[in-house]
Amino acid sequence: MNELSFISHEQERIGVHILPTQKFKTTTILLHIQLPLTEELVTKGALLPNVLQRGTERYPNPAQLQRHLDSLYGAIFNAGVVKRGEKQIIQLYLEIANEKFLADSRPLLEEGIRFLGEVLTRPLLENGAFAKKVVELEKEALTKRIEGLIDDKMRYANQRLTEEMCKEEPYRLLAYGIREQIPQITSEDLYAFYQEVLSSYPVDMYVIGDVQPDEAAKHLHQYIPLVASGAKELPPTTYKKTVTKEHTVTEEMSVAQGKLNIGMRTQIGYADDDYVHLMMYNGVLGGFPHSKLFMNVREKASLAYYAVSQLETQKGLCMIMSGIETANYEQALTIIKEQLDMMRRGEITDVELNQTKAMLTNQLRETRDSAAAIASMDYNGRLSGRRRSLEEILDGISRTTKEDVARVAQKVEIDTIYFLRGKEEAK
């Protein structure tokens, strides 16, 4: 067993994953609930964790809830939602001090798990539904969060590219949901949805820290008595799609800086043997300051304020993002495409290859210092159907050759080019 191996079992069809480790002086408890990414569920799924973290039957408002967390030696609690491939993931996170390192012998692990259990199983209710005032406040906050996306032009351009590129796929949906659906959600609707979520969808619980696995499992069983007897099997994310045509979408907005984003399909998912080579591909292309996009588009040609690429791991996409002057669109696009052609031909320098290996290795080793990152890596593997140890990924990186990267590059195809240009510049 390596140092990051989880002890896992199923408890009433709920995945329980415990990592006993002396690396941390706190204990981290995470709960993940998978929902299918659909128009019908996504907005309620986004609203739900925000309502849950506003209070419980025992701690009926945020102030009382926070005072209780403060009494647990400043425990940190938050809830939210993320998108992983074509799934929406509700996350609850609790980090609490380990009593082994305190003079106080108070059983903090047990109290922390009991608190999470209260959040999940005894939320703040009135008349058999979530408290109406809380739901209305969180609906307003969610509306503002979605509307605020347009103020962050980098994120806005990436979301618009995703919507255009994946028009016929669930992945087009924003994890925060659909703004137009928010007004119709009632506290009764949301509570009924919550009952369905707890009984029907896959749940995984993680405990990471200097704990006894049997003791942690016993507390989870006692205080979080979820029974997923009807747990639904969610379909895997579809990541292979033939590109028949390169699409171009241009929009105008009052922006000081144009956003040129390019969505590419790699046909490679996390479970594929080539996934580690794809990580190397992204690193050489645009993952770091030494990468081709940064060096050739931004530094040498001075065509971009930024030029980077990133992987959408579960969906098998590689997204290029750049900030440019509108007048430089054609020239910037030409140079970006030249970098992609160089990758396909295997024109990769020793410096690019070796620095990418070093940067990726450092990034991955840093995950050992974060309990949340350790859990995230394990959970990504479970979602994709193939778990890799950190050592396996590091070994794969060290063995990757220029030929491996070129072979991956030949599978990568541009699907959609999205350009957000300034209105004044367009005239």
Image (cartoon, grey):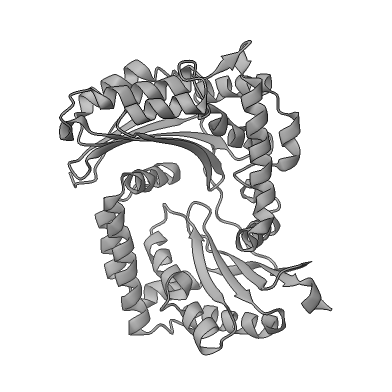
Relative to 22, is 58 on the left or the right? right
Q: Residue 182's quadrant in the figure? A: top right
- Give x and y (percent) for residue 304: 58, 79
- How many labels sit on residues? 0
Whether residue 389 is situated above or below residue 91 in the rendered picture: below
- Give x and y (percent) for residue 156: 65, 58
Query: Residue at position x 67%, y 83% from top?
Result: 328
Query: Residue at position x 34%, y 34% from top?
Result: 75
Relative to 7, is 331 on the left or the right? right
Q: Residue 253's quadrant in the figure? A: bottom right
Residue 20 in view: yes
Q: Farthest bottom residue?
A: 300
- Give x and y (percent) for residue 391: 24, 56
Whether residue 427 is situated above or below residue 124 in the rendered picture: below
- Give x and y (percent) for residue 330: 69, 83
Camera-side residue of 359 and 96: 96
Whether residue 128 is situated above or below residue 61 in the rendered picture: above
Relative to 341, is 70 on the left or the right? left
